[in-house]
């Protein structure tokens, strides 16, 4: 039998058969090993979450840039586009992310009205 090892965010490793592993693996890069229990480091999980927001919002911002250019060419009102771009830029700084103290609350902080469907659903 070959042993499988789990490595946490700090490089600590443990035999997978000997530890309690979180049911959810969305924030595996935030796992922290303490004895035989793996838990999520919330600060690291929040950074992973913010990075995912930045990844998702990039094409959304690019699409809004195209909309803005088209609106400027026709002298159309650009205020809604500017508001949408601001919301995308501000998404990683949402207080719901900062205030999340569990993985479930962090996942719930995904603003579908700004970012679309959550990758954590």
Image (cartoon, helix red, strand yellow):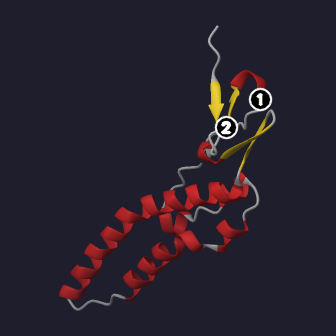
Query: Is 52 left or right of 1, judged from the image as shown?
Result: left
Marks 2 and 1, how far apart in space? 12 Å
Which quarter of the figure has residue 68? Answer: bottom left
The residue most toward the front is 11
Residue pointed to by mark 1: 19
Q: Residue at x 54, y 54 (%)?
A: 118
Return the residue nearer the eye: 75 or 93: 93
Vertical placement of residue 56 versus 27, above or below: below
Task: Give x and y (percent) for residue 25.
Answer: 63, 39
Mark number for residue 93? none
Can you identify the residue that label 2 sits on?
A: 12
Q: Residue at x 43, y 59 (%)?
A: 55
Q: Is residue 60 left or right of residue 73?
A: right
Q: Which of pointers 2 and 1 lies earlier in the amino acid sequence?
A: 2
Coordinates of residue 28 in the picture (x, y in percent): 62, 42
Residue closest to the far top: 1
Which residue is located at x 64 percent, y 54 percent? 45
Residue contact at pointers 2 and 1, CB within 8 angstroms? no
Image coordinates for residue 22, horizontal then vertical, percent: 72, 38
SS at circle 1: loop
């Amino acid at each position: 039998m070959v042993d499988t090892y789990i490595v946490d965010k700090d490089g600590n490793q443990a035999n997978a058969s000997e530890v309690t592993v979180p049911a959810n693996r969305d924030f595996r890069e935030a796992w922290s090993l303490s004895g035989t229990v793996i838990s999520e480091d919330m600060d690291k999980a929040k950074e992973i979450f913010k990075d995912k927001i930045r990844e998702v919002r990039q094409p959304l911002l690019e699409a809004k840039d195209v909309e803005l250019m088209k609106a400027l060419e026709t002298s159309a009102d650009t205020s809604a586009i500017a508001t949408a771009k601001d919301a995308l830029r501000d998404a990683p700084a949402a207080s719901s992310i900062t205030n999340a103290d569990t993985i479930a609350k962090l996942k719930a902080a995904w603003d579908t009205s700004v970012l679309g469907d959550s990758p954590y659903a």
